[in-house]
Amino acid sequence: MPNIKAAMKALRKSKKVKITNDAVKNNIGRLIKKSRKAIDAKADTAKDLVQQTVKALDKAVQKKILKPNTGNRKKSRLMKKLNQIIAK
C-alpha cells in the first residue's frame, strides 16, 4: 500500500483505468466472436458486425488500449475471413 498521497491517487486512478480498459477489451472480444459466428453461418448481418468490430478496434487503438499491430492483426484476420465467404 502506498504511503505518499500522490502514489495513493495514482493507484486509485490506475484501478479505474484498468476497469474501463477491461470493459473495452471484453466488448471487442464479444464483437469478434459474434462476427466470426455470423461469418461462419453466412448471415446477412456479418458485414455489419465486422464493421462494428473494426470501428471498436480502431477506437481501442486510438485510445492506446490495444497496440496498433494487435488491432491491425485482428482486423486483417476478420476481413480475410469475411472476404473468403463473400467471394464464394
Image (tube, grey):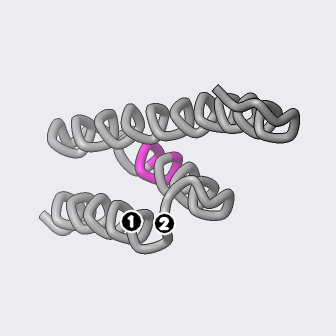
* Mark 1 burial class by Cα count in 10 Å: few <14, some 14-19, many 20+: few
Q: Where residue 70 is drawn, which disc sits there? A: 1
Farthest residue to the front: give it. 3
* Secondary structure state at the residue bearing disc 2: loop
Circle 2: residue type: Lys
Residue at left 55%, top 30%?
Answer: 23
Q: Where residue 67 is drawn, which disc sits there? A: 2
Question: In the figure, 75 relative to 44: above or below?
Answer: below
* Mark 2 burial class by Cα count in 10 Å: few <14, some 14-19, many 20+: few
Quadrant of the rendered image containing residue 81: bottom left
Residue numbers of the magenta segment = 48-52
Residue at left 38%, top 32%?
Answer: 30
Q: Tell me the quadrant of the picture where the N terminus can be found.
A: top right
Q: Where residue 85 is drawn, which disc sits there? A: none
Circle 1: residue type: Thr
The CA span between labels 1 and 2 is: 5 Å
Q: Tell me the quadrant of the picture where the C terminus can be found.
A: bottom left
Q: Main secondary structure of the magenta part?
A: helix
Q: Nearer the viewer, residue 17 or 53?
A: 17
Farthest residue to the right: give it. 5
Q: Position of residue 2 (x, y in %)?
A: 70, 31
Q: Nearer the viewer, residue 64 or 2?
A: 2
Q: Position of residue 80 (x, y in %)?
A: 24, 68
Q: Position of residue 4 (x, y in %)?
A: 82, 36
